[in-house]
């Protein structure tokens, strides 16, 4: 699956460049391979279900955010500095009392709290909450909707397309 995703991203990157548009993400092939394996599904499902129930968030939505953010790998660090399973920036991690961003359970709990906060802020509008998870609440509020950022639009579309299945 990783090879397929890398090929798809590279294809999109080439298509965008051919029409003069730049995509703000680096193709997967250029990113270093995470140094850890994805969390095994039974363990991951248990953690997701517990955190979702604790914070009243749909476990399927939470699962898709974690899939999109890290591919369920707890050691991932983005080029922008987001860390862990739920890819939280250091400021956000501190806001939600996350002491170890690479501890999958802690990261999942903090990311669930953030997602719940955003869902509440946007009156349950999943699209806006996802846009804010990716681009920041300030950007979504300023733009009055999902920002016109290709990465954010793709992020929301990817999660929603899997979430509604």
Image (spheres, rainbow, N blue to C red):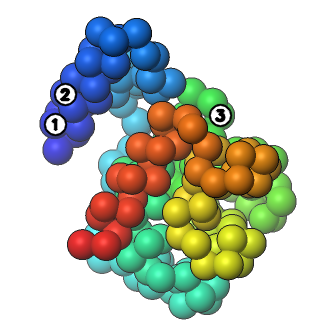
The image shows a total of numbered marks equal to 3
Q: Is 107 drawn above or below residue 92 in the view shown?
A: below
Depth check: 164 or 29 in front?
Answer: 164
Q: Is residue 156 left or right of residue 144?
A: left
Which numbered disc flags the more N-terminal residue, 2 or 3? Answer: 2
> Where is residue 48 shown, x and y percent of the image?
46, 77
Alpha-carbon span between mark 3 and mark 1: 25 Å
Q: Which residue is mark 3?
A: 81
Q: Is residue 54 left or right of residue 92?
A: left
Alpha-carbon span between mark 2 and mark 3: 24 Å
> Where is residue 69 shown, x and y percent of the image?
47, 50
Q: Which residue is mark 1?
A: 4
Q: Which mark is residue 7?
A: 2
Q: Would you say residue 102 is visible in this rendering?
A: no
Q: Quadrant of the C terminus?
A: bottom left
Query: Residue at 31% of width from left, 73% of height from top?
Result: 164
Quarter-of-image position of residue 77: top right
Alpha-carbon span between mark 1 and mark 2: 5 Å
Callout 3 secondary element? loop
> Where is residue 65 shown, x and y percent of the image?
46, 61
Query: Residue at 22% of width from left, 23% of height from top?
Result: 11
Query: Residue at 78% of width from left, 65% of height from top?
Result: 96
Q: Which mark is residue 31?
A: none
Report if the CB atoms under discs 1 and 2 are less than 8 Å apart. Answer: yes
Depth check: 51 or 139 in front?
Answer: 139
Q: Would you say residue 41 is visible in this rendering?
A: yes
Q: Is 125 drawn above or below residue 72 in the view shown?
A: below
Q: Quadrant of the N terminus?
A: top left
Of badges 3 and 1, the one in the foreground is 1
Q: Is 52 drawn above or below residue 19 in the view shown?
A: below
């Amino acid at each position: 699956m990783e090879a397929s995703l890398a090929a798809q991203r590279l294809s999109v990157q080439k298509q965008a460049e051919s029409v003069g548009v730049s995509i703000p993400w680096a193709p997967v092939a250029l990113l270093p391979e995470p140094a850890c394996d994805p969390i095994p599904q039974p363990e991951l499902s248990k953690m997701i279900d517990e955190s979702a129930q604790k914070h009243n968030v749909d476990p399927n939505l939470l699962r898709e955010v974690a899939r999109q953010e890290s591919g369920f790998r707890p050691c991932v660090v983005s080029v922008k500095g987001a860390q862990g399973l739920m890819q939280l920036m250091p400021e956000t991690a501190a806001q939600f009392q996350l002491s170890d961003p690479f501890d999958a359970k802690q990261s999942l709990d903090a990311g669930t709290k953030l997602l719940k906060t955003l869902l509440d802020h946007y009156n349950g509008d999943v699209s806006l909450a996802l846009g804010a998870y990716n681009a920041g609440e300030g950007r979504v509020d300023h733009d009055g909707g999902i920002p016109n950022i290709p990465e954010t639009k793709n992020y929301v579309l990817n999660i929603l397309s899997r979430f509604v299945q």
